[in-house]
Image (spheres, rainbow, N blue to C red):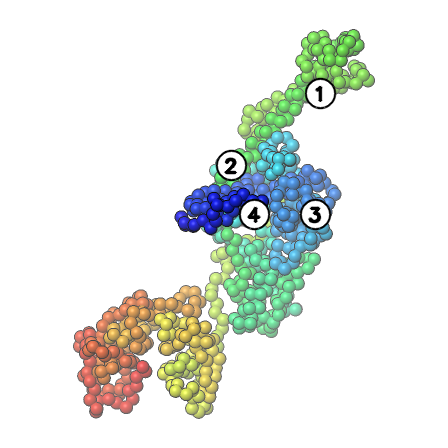
Amino acid sequence: MARKKSTSKTAQQPKIHGYIAGAGEVVEQKIVSTIEENYMPYAMSVIMSRAIPEIDGFKPSHRKLLYTMYKMGLLGSTRTKSANIVGQTMKLNPHGDSAIYDTMVRLSRGYEALLHPYIDSKGNFGKFYSRDMAWAASRYTEAKLDPICNELFGDIDKDTVDFVDNYDNTLKEPTLLPAAFPSILVNANTGIAVGMASSICSFNLAEVCETTIGLLKNPDFDIMSTLIAPDFTGGAQIIYDRKVIENIYNTGRGSIKMRGRYTYDKYANCIDILSIPQTTTCEAIIEKVIELVKGGKIREIADIRDETGIDGLKITIDLKRGVNPDKLMQKLYKMTPLEDSFSCNFNVLIGGTPRVMGVRELLNEWSAFRIECVKRRTYFDLHKKQDKLHLLKGLEKILLDIDKAIKIIRNTEEENDVVPNLMSGFGIDETQAEYVAEIKLRHLNRQYILKRTEDISQLEKDIEELESILNSKTKIKNIIIRELKEIAEKYGQPRRSMLIYADEINTDDEEEEIPDYPVNLFFTKDGYFKKITPQSLRMSGEHKLKEGDEITEHLESTNNTDLIFFSDKCQAYKSKAVDFADTKASVLGEYIPSKLSMDEGENAIYMIATKDYSGYVFFFYENGKAAKVPLESYATKTNRKKLTGAYSDKDKLAAICYVPNDECEILIKSSSGRMLLLKSGDILAKTSRTTQGVAVIKLKKGYKVMSACVYEDSMLSKPERYRAKTIPSSGQLPRGDEVGEQITFNA
């Protein structure tokens, strides 16, 4: 709780015109109270009334829009201006016209985001697969309800769902729509609430109806036998993995991999991408491809352009001569959004409570909802027929003596007594008497009354059938099954998303063919790098270096080797020799901190070239400790370029040495002049890169390790004097005749 002092003295302020008591006064309030009183109602409102769909498959904004269009009579052949629809919807939806129109666009046929659009649109409604193709303003477009909405509103006037007041209590609106098919699974629906979200993928209507029928007949029905996989409106290919699909069906959570579909035109030497994943756009794909081409990661593409038109989505990629289109597409699938994932989270409001459910549970909940709708519809029809039968029963009694009915009415002096006199004269109730009294004089003939009463037997049969339906859950299920079959036959469409099985996809990581040839790698003290071919090196003169710089490493390797550069900030940067252009000795070379985007003030101090990540890296610290780390600790499965924590930062680093095996020896020199010859196998390797190592050389106070290098023959004339018998060791001071001319130390 934050304590704030009052900034005003309201007690001393006089009551003058325009003065508000308490204005400017800061009142203390506990944060818990603020959350409970302000944030929690907002969070609940977003969850319950905005972002999470209900069992009928709609969010409140969808339901309000569609119901408004239904009440406007747009479930027919005529369209009206979208602006008119938006204006009428504002009577139910208190949001702005822009938000309502955006909702309308996403439900439209023109936008193409739904497998079965609810709105039949005319005009430019944009496309879901295009980020930049904006839809026209509402004053230019027209719309009406799509015929499939007959299955949403067919029973709404028969008390199948509850109605509530709108936000200003001037109109009634339905809490749910009595959808006759599981629309919750047929059309995709996503929403982000507070602390939770919902993401429901779309399924083929015919498959959903068939699966629901199977579950209504048998609760243990195998849904995988009919509901094969999701079906996306964009037609992208689904990478089918049965275990992944089963997990989504069982838990309501998971991720479905999709990839675009393409064709190759060998005459034009171009690839036409005709469908893309539901989660991306044409512009995102094109921008990523252009980025890869500019970065030199893809060299096979000559041009890429968006040719989307009246025939639908189309991205054309022009290829360079001799390019294999299938191999290029495999690279694009890996490196661009052409292959993407749809994350499923089947979070639905059930009775006002958000629940994440699998497909079986979701269809069972919808079945329970639909059974209740059919019950209420049947009950409504039953009461209507019972009321009609009741009236006709009274009319039938009049048939026995029409003249008596006329006489009673004619001899009644006051109008208010007509109904009571008819009731007493024929033994009928008030409702029947009112009905008889309202019959026109021209209809008081035997033929009219016989025509009206001949339906009594049929009504009695209908009432008996309706009562039997209400008393039999099986009959209600059979009605739902019959309706689902009719809907599947009437609106069913072939699958749009093709299935490709995961085990049939070539998952071999085919590396780009790198020309492999011998190269000489040079690394300097100031962090410059050169890659020179042997032929060029033989023809070159002296190396060009910055003033004061010198070559510290010269390695012979090949063009497809991996390079690891260690910095003075305990970090390592990985690269490949192929990433550097061949150069000559007469140039400075590439500046590694700049080339590898090292941090500001960071310098490269050591280089290792490897193909198999064998051997060990030794780190020598000024305090006399040495750490031995396997080089394979720096191998990564992903293409990470930067590795933090490359070595320990507990003490200042003196030197780095790479040894290919445990048979090597390392020559260490301290500031006191003592030297120690250490066998690499005498130190145990540690898998942790940040290990502090073990003490290898004893140092007197004020002295430190200066340098270390891999020992080579002729560096010392009597190397046995310096070999350590135990670790740590103090080393030996060299004699004048024991140091060879070839010894070098790289501090």
Where disc 1 sits, the SS reads loop
Q: Is residue 369 visible?
A: yes
Q: Which mark is residue 189?
A: 4
Spatial CA span between label 2 and label 4? 19 Å
Q: Are marks 3 and 2 in contact (CB under 8 Å)?
A: no
Q: Earlier in the sequence, mark 4 or mark 1?
A: 4
Q: Are marks 1 and 3 in contact (CB under 8 Å)?
A: no
Spatial CA span between label 1 and label 3? 46 Å
The residue lying at 41 percent from left, 69 percent from top is 642
Circle 1 residue:
455
The residue lying at 55 percent from left, 39 percent from top is 55
Give the mark toward the camera: 2 or 4: 2
Q: Which mark is residue 390?
A: none
Where disc 3 sits, the SS reads helix
Spatial CA span between label 4 and label 3? 22 Å
Identity, as a three-letter code, of the amino acid under mark 3:
Ser
Where disc 2 sits, the SS reads loop
Where disc 4 sits, the SS reads strand
Where's residue 33, x and y in %? 44, 43
97 to 535, vertically: above or below:
above
In the rendered structure, the answer to whether residue 531 lies left or right of residue 308 reads left
Where's residue 556, x and y in %? 39, 82
Identity, as a three-letter code, of the amino acid under mark 2:
Gly
The residue lying at 53 percent from left, 34 percent from top is 368
In the rendered structure, the answer to whether residue 703 lies left or right of residue 287 reads left
Q: Is residue 486 visible?
A: no
Q: Which mark is residue 351?
A: 2
Q: Observer-nearest residue: 735 or 630?
A: 735
Where's residue 227, x and y in %? 54, 45
Identity, as a three-letter code, of the amino acid under mark 4:
Asn
